[in-house]
Structure formats: structure tokens, C-alpha cells
Image (cartoon, helix red, strand yellow):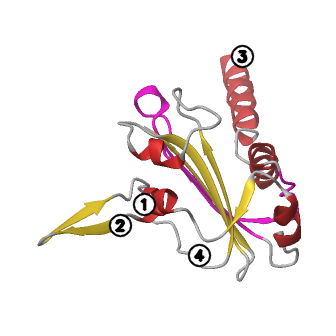
Amino acid sequence: MIRRYSFLLVSVIMLGLTGCGISSSSVQMELSQTLGVDLSQGKLVETQDSHGGFHGDGERWVTLSFANNDLSQVLEEEEAWQKFPLPESLEILLYGKTKTEGTASIQEGPYAIWEIPRISKGYYFFRDRHEEATATEDLEQVLKRGSFNFTVALYDTENKTLHYYELDT
């Protein structure tokens, strides 16, 4: 009798665990809501998430391919999306910048830990999720903080690829 219940318990646990995986459609639905754009036609290429640290700190990286469905026209019409080039503050946040002052070289940034691909032609989305953020705040204010909570998405029109990045520190 105990064997039967043990087998039943293990079976129920295994059945429950099979539903715990992250499906590509759930990732696309979540990102669609966050970015305000339908991403259901994209193909999930990569997803990584290191959140779960102290107070939920961590990073999330998602790459979607739109090889058969270019998003350029849709993003052109979305108010939250801007056409490249990136503003200097966002460039520093993602890639860093070396400044020369006299004979000294000073490196500012990057603050993103994941190596984000450089894109020369495309669209970008940026949302500051920091508790001190205001709707009218300039991106330069983000660089002056001691912690970061932001979401950025870059759409590469040449490769038809969307790169999504979250940082919470």
C-alpha cells in the first residue's frame, strides 16, 4: 500500500514539474505587454535570467528573431520607441565611454553587465523603473544614481532581431 501511494505521489510531483517550464509564447506575451508591441511573430533565440539575488537583484536577457516579419513599420508608429542613434546617456549605460581629461583617461560605464550587441540601425525602448524616477526625467539622471532598475530593448533592423535587457540592482 505504501508503495502505491509513494508511486502516486512521485507521479503527481513529476506531472506538476512538467508544467513549470517557461514557454516561448509566455515570454513573448510578457515582453509584448512591457514593450507595447505584439511580439507573437518572433522566434525565441535566447533567454537568461539571474534575478533572485538580494531584493530580487539581477539581470534578464531575451533575444527574439523576426526573420520572417520585420517590426520596423510597427515600431516607427509607437511613441515609446525611438529611432537610432542612442542618446549619449544610454550609450554610456549600455556600452560605456572613455573620457580624456588632461592626460588621464576616465572610463564611465558600462552599467549593463551582459554584453549587449552594438546596433547601428534600428529602434530603442527605454523605461526607468527606479522608485525615484519621474515621467519627465532626463536619462542623465539615471547615471547619477547608486542603483539601477531599468528596461531597455533594441531592435536591429538589419538583422531583424530584438534584444531585451532588464537590470535591477
Query: Which mark is on residue 106?
Result: none
What is the C-alpha distance between the residues marked 3 and 2? Answer: 68 Å
- Residue 10 falls in image quadrant: top right
Judging by the rendered image, the residue that carries numbered circle 4 is 119
Judging by the rendered image, the residue that carries numbered circle 1 is 92
Q: Position of residue 27 (x, y in %)?
A: 74, 49
Name the residue at 47% across, 43% down.
Answer: 142
Q: Is residue 34 left or right of residue 63?
A: right
Task: Between residue 124 and residue 87, name the one nearer to us.
Answer: 87
Q: Position of residue 93 (x, y in %)?
A: 45, 56
**Which residue appears farthest toward the top when viewing the image?**
1
What is the C-alpha distance between the residues marked 3 and 1? Answer: 65 Å
Which part of the image, by quadrant, shows the C terminus?
top left
- Residue 110 falls in image quadrant: bottom left
Name the residue at 79% across, 46% down.
Answer: 26
Judging by the rendered image, the residue that carries numbered circle 3 is 1
